[in-house]
Amino acid sequence: MNGPSGNVPTIGVFDSGFGGLTVLRALIARMPQARFAFLGDTARLPYGSKSRRTIARYAVQSAQFLVNEQGAEYLVIACNTASALALDAIQEAVPVPVLGVIEPGAAAARAASTTRDVLVVATDATVHSHAYSAACQAQGLRALEKACPLLVPLVEEGWTSHPVTAEVIRIYLDELRADAATRGMSADTLVLGCTHYPLLRPLIQQVLDGCGPCAIRVIDSAESTAEAAVKLFNGRTANATGLTAHTEIRCFATDSVEKFERLGSRFLERPVGRVELIDLGG
Amino acid sequence: MNGPSGNVPTIGVFDSGFGGLTVLRALIARMPQARFAFLGDTARLPYGSKSRRTIARYAVQSAQFLVNEQGAEYLVIACNTASALALDAIQEAVPVPVLGVIEPGAAAARAASTTRDVLVVATDATVHSHAYSAACQAQGLRALEKACPLLVPLVEEGWTSHPVTAEVIRIYLDELRADAATRGMSADTLVLGCTHYPLLRPLIQQVLDGCGPCAIRVIDSAESTAEAAVKLFNGRTANATGLTAHTEIRCFATDSVEKFERLGSRFLERPVGRVELIDLGG
């Protein structure tokens, strides 16, 4: 299958906001020759507080924009809430392969864990969906999830290496590990189940290292998803390493692009450039 | 003018979420004989990231629900973003007196300040609107605003007396006062320009007291708005003190009511009871 651009496939990446740019960054690192179209449905975020039906409707509209109007031949749903609640609906609605972020994270945890007990940190909405627990269970893992609602605002404030953020991470991880201990779990793996959290990975590792010889391995689901994408896309796009001048990226948003443009480069680790405003309706 | 309930007027209170319950709490304390209908447009929050036109449309729909379907004879817009960007549109759309939260906060600052220099802490969206600066300028005050985006999530996490929150407040206030000093301002008043912040008032006061003899007076715009409401409503409702059995409160929300019911009682300082789900359309 070749896309409208000949041999260069277009990969559509979708998020309710711009956190999914961490997934796009991981995809670019592995598929620098691809074209990417990223859509942040910023007018309708946060998805987490909305019903499954509403989320599916929004996500399908967004997926159709990427496939029908941007010619995406593959879709990556770089949004935990949409992956948890709307992956089936998206797969039914578009005729291209669709990959979410949750299964790859659980599969990577399966590969990393020897105790088969894993911890998951995520937003309130993702934890309430129990999507990681279900995906981990399907991999033969026991998972304990914890909502860490302060981490996204701390990342968006730019405090990714701030002492306050380290303290908040320490509190959350202490609570999570105490809870795991009371359940008799011996967890050796921590899944970062939110697209904002890769920016906190160094600090999370530092806090874990400070806990003594706990030997907990951190799984970044953005990285895991990008690895799964390379396999799913059958190697068509992975013919070089690192970012090259051939990478073509277009970013779209459904509402005010100011925050997207201002913060997005931290997530993408390169300028996001001009973000194009589109209207997907109500 | 009497409402559908005879001598007992109905006051409609509107917010994009449930933070405005702090304003409702202040209103109940001053008008315990009134009926209150509170609407949180939770399906469409946050308003802060949306355009003025969209916010006006949402706010007008919400105001019309309170007036036309709940018989509100007065409206209090307990939402800084809607007060900043949609007060005129609401006043044109409904035939009842409408009060926002910004003018009363600025007027209270005017009454409190002797130096005429005031500080304002608020959300990113409110600061970007510069509504407090404009309202303070109209009162002959010079205002310096600071966005404090971590405070709302800290309140919603329940960390209203947590050392991390105290540290975040200290950092924000230090930055704000340093900025004021470089501008040659001698501020003696701090306006809490967000409906979540009254829950942090004790901690904010504690941080200010720890700064030495700075003598900064804190203005809670929820309290100021309730005081202005009593005057605007012409004393019709202020015939007792404190909460009595006569206070009748109905709460409405446009999307999942779980978070509203779970967190709302902290803001209202009494149980919010059952929150009724309504549909205002797209």
Image: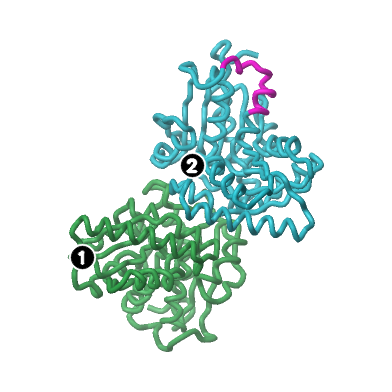
Chain colours: A cyan, B green
Q: Nearer the viewer, residue B13 or A141?
A: A141
Amino acid type of the residue that numbered disc 1 sits on in the rendered structure: Ser
Q: Nearer the viewer, residue A90 or A219?
A: A219
Q: Nearer the viewer, residue B141 or A278?
A: B141
Which residue carries the number 1 mark? B186
A178 versus B111 height, above or below: above
Q: Residue A42 — which label? A: 2
Q: Chain of mark 2?
A: A
Horizontal and vertical percent position of residue B115: 18, 69
Whether residue A50 sits left or right of residue A276 in the image: it is right
Amino acid type of the residue that numbered disc 2 sits on in the rendered structure: Thr
Q: Quadrant of residue A102?
A: top right
Horizontal and vertical percent position of residue A68: 57, 25
**Closer mark to the observer between disc 2 and disc 1:** 1
Is residue A263 located in the magenta-colored stretch of the structure?
Answer: no
Quarter of the image with the N terminus of chain B in it: bottom left
**Residue shown at the point (73%, 56%) measured from the top left:** A180
Horizontal and vertical percent position of residue A272: 43, 31
Q: Chain of mark 1?
A: B
